[in-house]
Image (spheres, rainbow, N blue to C red):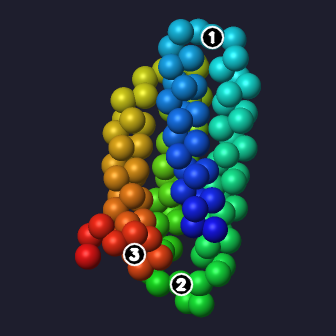
Amino acid sequence: MTHAHITTWVVALILFVVAIALQAKGHEKTKMLHMLLRLFYILIIATGAWILHSMSSFPFLYIVKVIVGLWVIGTMEMILVRTAKGKNTNVLWLQFIVAFVVVLYLGFKLPFGFSFFS
Protein backbone atom coordinates (compact mmCIF):
# COMPACT_ATOMS: atom_id res chain seq x y z
CA MET A 1 0.00 0.00 0.00
CA THR A 2 2.98 2.28 0.48
CA HIS A 3 3.64 2.26 -3.26
CA ALA A 4 0.04 3.23 -3.99
CA HIS A 5 0.33 6.09 -1.50
CA ILE A 6 3.55 7.35 -3.04
CA THR A 7 2.11 7.00 -6.55
CA THR A 8 -0.97 9.04 -5.65
CA TRP A 9 1.24 11.74 -4.14
CA VAL A 10 3.43 11.92 -7.23
CA VAL A 11 0.45 12.05 -9.59
CA ALA A 12 -1.24 14.68 -7.41
CA LEU A 13 1.88 16.85 -7.44
CA ILE A 14 2.12 16.58 -11.22
CA LEU A 15 -1.57 17.47 -11.56
CA PHE A 16 -1.06 20.39 -9.18
CA VAL A 17 1.81 21.81 -11.22
CA VAL A 18 -0.10 21.34 -14.48
CA ALA A 19 -3.22 22.95 -12.98
CA ILE A 20 -1.21 25.96 -11.80
CA ALA A 21 0.39 26.30 -15.22
CA LEU A 22 -2.96 26.07 -17.01
CA GLN A 23 -4.52 28.59 -14.63
CA ALA A 24 -1.73 31.03 -15.36
CA LYS A 25 -2.56 30.76 -19.05
CA GLY A 26 -6.31 31.02 -18.44
CA HIS A 27 -7.02 27.63 -20.00
CA GLU A 28 -10.59 26.30 -20.05
CA LYS A 29 -9.75 22.78 -18.84
CA THR A 30 -8.44 23.95 -15.48
CA LYS A 31 -11.71 23.20 -13.69
CA MET A 32 -11.72 19.60 -14.91
CA LEU A 33 -8.11 19.13 -13.86
CA HIS A 34 -8.87 20.64 -10.46
CA MET A 35 -11.68 18.13 -9.96
CA LEU A 36 -9.34 15.28 -10.91
CA LEU A 37 -6.82 16.60 -8.41
CA ARG A 38 -9.52 16.55 -5.73
CA LEU A 39 -10.10 12.88 -6.52
CA PHE A 40 -6.41 12.28 -5.92
CA TYR A 41 -6.65 14.11 -2.58
CA ILE A 42 -9.23 11.52 -1.57
CA LEU A 43 -7.01 8.68 -2.81
CA ILE A 44 -4.05 10.09 -0.87
CA ILE A 45 -6.09 10.26 2.31
CA ALA A 46 -7.53 6.77 1.74
CA THR A 47 -4.17 5.12 1.11
CA GLY A 48 -2.63 6.97 4.04
CA ALA A 49 -5.47 5.83 6.30
CA TRP A 50 -5.00 2.28 5.05
CA ILE A 51 -1.30 2.40 5.87
CA LEU A 52 -2.02 3.85 9.31
CA HIS A 53 -4.69 1.21 9.91
CA SER A 54 -2.27 -1.59 9.02
CA MET A 55 0.09 -0.53 11.81
CA SER A 56 -0.27 -2.17 15.20
CA SER A 57 0.37 1.06 17.10
CA PHE A 58 0.33 4.75 16.22
CA PRO A 59 3.54 6.48 17.30
CA PHE A 60 3.21 10.22 17.83
CA LEU A 61 5.28 11.16 14.77
CA TYR A 62 2.89 9.28 12.49
CA ILE A 63 0.03 11.37 13.83
CA VAL A 64 2.13 14.49 13.19
CA LYS A 65 2.78 13.25 9.65
CA VAL A 66 -0.96 12.80 9.08
CA ILE A 67 -1.65 16.35 10.26
CA VAL A 68 1.15 17.83 8.15
CA GLY A 69 0.02 15.77 5.15
CA LEU A 70 -3.47 17.21 5.49
CA TRP A 71 -1.85 20.64 5.76
CA VAL A 72 -0.08 20.02 2.43
CA ILE A 73 -3.34 18.99 0.76
CA GLY A 74 -5.11 22.01 2.23
CA THR A 75 -2.49 24.43 0.98
CA MET A 76 -2.54 22.87 -2.48
CA GLU A 77 -6.30 23.37 -2.64
CA MET A 78 -6.15 26.91 -1.29
CA ILE A 79 -3.40 27.87 -3.74
CA LEU A 80 -5.48 26.68 -6.68
CA VAL A 81 -8.67 28.37 -5.51
CA ARG A 82 -7.03 31.67 -4.60
CA THR A 83 -5.05 31.70 -7.84
CA ALA A 84 -8.28 31.22 -9.79
CA LYS A 85 -9.79 34.17 -7.92
CA GLY A 86 -6.72 36.31 -8.61
CA LYS A 87 -5.80 36.67 -4.94
CA ASN A 88 -2.33 36.72 -3.39
CA THR A 89 -0.89 33.27 -2.66
CA ASN A 90 2.62 34.08 -1.40
CA VAL A 91 1.94 32.99 2.19
CA LEU A 92 0.25 29.82 0.98
CA TRP A 93 3.24 28.93 -1.19
CA LEU A 94 5.51 29.36 1.82
CA GLN A 95 3.23 27.15 3.91
CA PHE A 96 3.13 24.57 1.13
CA ILE A 97 6.91 24.41 0.85
CA VAL A 98 7.44 24.16 4.62
CA ALA A 99 4.73 21.53 5.08
CA PHE A 100 5.92 19.53 2.08
CA VAL A 101 9.51 19.45 3.33
CA VAL A 102 8.34 18.40 6.81
CA VAL A 103 6.08 15.65 5.49
CA LEU A 104 8.82 14.34 3.20
CA TYR A 105 11.30 14.33 6.06
CA LEU A 106 8.89 12.47 8.31
CA GLY A 107 8.00 10.06 5.53
CA PHE A 108 11.63 9.17 4.97
CA LYS A 109 12.65 9.27 8.63
CA LEU A 110 9.95 7.09 10.13
CA PRO A 111 10.43 3.30 10.10
CA PHE A 112 7.64 2.68 7.59
CA GLY A 113 9.40 4.83 4.98
CA PHE A 114 12.76 4.68 3.25
CA SER A 115 15.93 5.02 5.29
CA PHE A 116 17.66 8.04 3.77
CA PHE A 117 18.16 9.65 7.20
CA SER A 118 19.43 6.79 9.34
- Residue bearing the label numbered 2: 58
Q: Which element is circle 2 on?
A: loop
Q: Which comes before the other along the chain, label 2 or label 1?
A: 1
In this view, 94 is above or below 64: above
Q: Is residue 84 visible?
A: yes
Q: Is residue 43 left or right of residue 98?
A: right
Q: Residue at x 50, y 53 (%)?
A: 71
Quadrant (top left, top right, bottom left, bottom right) of the N terminus? bottom right
Q: Marks 2 and 3: which is nearer the front?
A: 3
Circles 2 and 1, Cβ within 8 Å, touching? The answer is no
Give the Cα distance between marks 2 and 1. Answer: 43 Å
Q: Is residue 42 left or right of residue 59?
A: right
Which residue type does callout 2 highlight?
Phe
Residue 8's tag is: none
Q: Tell me residue 18's x, y (percent).
A: 54, 26
Residue 110's tag is: 3
Q: Which comes before the other along the chain, label 2 or label 3?
A: 2
Which residue type does callout 1 highlight?
His
Location of residue 107 by image quarter: bottom left
Q: Tell me residue 3's x, y (percent).
A: 58, 62
Q: Residue at x 40, y 50 (%)?
A: 100
In this view, 97 is above or below 99: above
- Residue bearing the label numbered 1: 27
Q: Residue at x 36, y 29 (%)?
A: 90
Task: Depth check: give the residue in front, 76 or 114.
Answer: 114
Q: Tell me residue 98's x, y (percent).
A: 34, 49
